[in-house]
Amino acid sequence: MESVNEYIVEMTDIEKSFALVKAVSNGQFNLKKGEIHSLIGENGAGKSTMMKMLYGIYANDGGVIKIKGSEVTGLTPKIAIEHGIGMVHQEFMLVNELTVLENIILGFEPKKNMIIDFDSAKKEIQKYIDTYNMDIQPNKRIDQISVGEAQRVEIIKTLYRGAEIVILDEPTAVLTPQECKKFFEILNSLKADGKSIVFISHKLNEVMEISDRITVMRQGKFVDTVNKEDTNTAELAKMMVGREVFLNVAKKKAEVGKTVLQVDGLWTSGEKELSKIRGVSLDVKAGEIVGIAGIDGNGQSELIEAIAGLRKVEKGTVKLDGVDVTNRSPKKIREAGLTHIPEDRNLRGLNRRMTIMDNMVAVKIDQKPFAKGIIQNHKEIRSFSEKLIEKFDVRPRNPLALTQALSGGNAQKIVVAREVDADGKLLIASQPSRGVDIGAIESIRKILNEVKANGKGILLVSADLEEVLSLSDRIIVMYEGKITGMMSAEEANEDNIGMLMMGGYSEGSDKIVQAGGEALS
């Protein structure tokens, strides 16, 4: 039996509600000194809420929080920092216009004769850089550094403020495989130095690689805490979902047909300079899945918007099934054969104030048999939506249920069902499993494979490299608005894709080598 004293953090019988939603109803978590303890669960399981209570962002409604053996109440981030707790959020809390050094000391500036002592701050920060091999440049501005560097800045910021306990919320979501490897080396250095780390994640392979212990939550409740050596990814997935899950859908060899999408020399504006599309060319054939890999913000969103008519094409052409649809309206492009699962289902995929039924029929509400003139046929609409609800396993089964009451997974299934049923020539699936639970991921991946088997072309965009590798027949990699490489799925692996995700191809060459050694101009 373990002694209670060996826990640096104990969270017992924690409760937290937001309005009518019970976010956590039986939260249990403890942390030993010098360990990496992963907290996992599906979206909405309560894992981030638990850690935001430990860091003092939220107040717990019930239960006990102990830090270093003493109960703590009225936690705020300031008090948490005083107790040696630091948190690195999914969205980094950095000021772009300031330098790395200025961001780290912000609010904790050392003073000498009433003036900020930058020299002493720099010396102290250099100790962290050297001790943990952090590889950052203190004089660079935040807007000049990579995402991986920004994350290291956030970690040093917590250490500079005296953190012995570091909470990391989905820290690998923005990293390439190479950056992830480097990041894990840093975490192991921190652990070896006696720091205690909470690793919030849903990536089970990474959890198995980095953790000492793993706590699983499901629907706001504690499920179990296990030692890494006593479990595996399949067991963890089962604990998270409550049933066995099979994410590795058997991939059949693509039987490709004619070209359904041809993009030539496309240029379009970007939300920021690195996402501006610069001369992108690609194609998708019937019966294949072409995956686009890359860290978010490297032009994937802008490329898809340009193809779908949601962003103006400045130069180049987009052809759908041989028809030039460049700069046509989204409605005209859809009529030409495009279906589209957008990356943000709430912004572009659904009207959350409408019913499941209304959302299911949204793209054909003005067509027969659902309407005659301005008169809607509610019987036909309901019958149609009930069939899709059943076929795509949307829950609840009630077509009149409001979409805003649904989980992320079921909301996404509505979009997937509507777009797949529309039976276009090309399906753009943009971040199809973002923000959905493991059970829904399993379902969506099966559906995409069925669409491919039915001879449709799919352009898949996903920040989840494992998803791109497991589903795609060919893979395109984007970095700063350009394609850095293309290869067949057989040739692709995390290392060579990861290098391309960081811009790793010969700048001296004006050609990019494709699978099989064929050059693309």
Image (cartoon, rainbow, N blue to C red):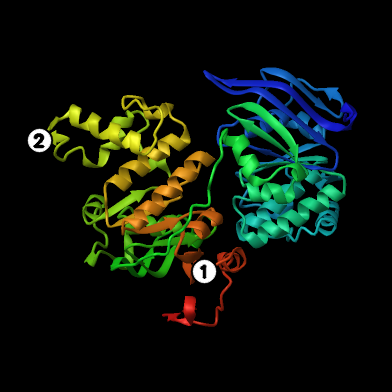
Q: Is residue 270 left or right of residue 160?
A: left
Mark 1 burial class by Cα count in 10 Å: few <14, some 14-19, many 20+: few
Q: Where's residue 254, x and y in %?
A: 39, 64
Dot 2 crowding, Cα within 10 Å, few <14, some 14–19, many 20+: few
Helix, strand, or loop for circle 2?
A: loop
Q: Which mark is residue 86?
A: none
In the rendered structure, which amino acid carries the disc numbered 2? Answer: Gly
432 up-or-down from 136: above or below: above
For the image, the number of numbered tags is 2
Amino acid type indicated by mark 1: Glu
**Structural distance between the alpha carbons of marks 1 and 2:** 51 Å
Query: What residue is at 74 percent from the left and 30 percent from the top?
Result: 29
Residue at 32% across, 46% down: 419
Q: Is residue 410 left or right of residue 157?
A: left
Q: Name the foreground residue: 332 vs 115.
A: 332
Residue that mark 1 sits on: 490
The reply to whether residue 82 is visible in this rendering is yes
85 displayed left or right of 148: right
* Residue 511 % position (x, y): 47, 80
Within the image, what quadrant is residue 425 found in?
Answer: bottom left
Question: In the rendered image of this protein, does residue 19 appear above or below residue 262?
Answer: above
Q: Is residue 73 left or right of residue 412?
A: right
Image quadrant for the N terminus?
A: top right
- Quadrant assignment for the C terminus: bottom left
Residue 68, position in %: x, y? 86, 29
In-front residue for pair 126/486: 486
Is 41 or 267 nearer to us in this picture? Answer: 41
Residue at 22% x, 56% y: name it.
336
Quickly name the residue at label 2. 373
Q: Quadrant of residue 315?
A: bottom left
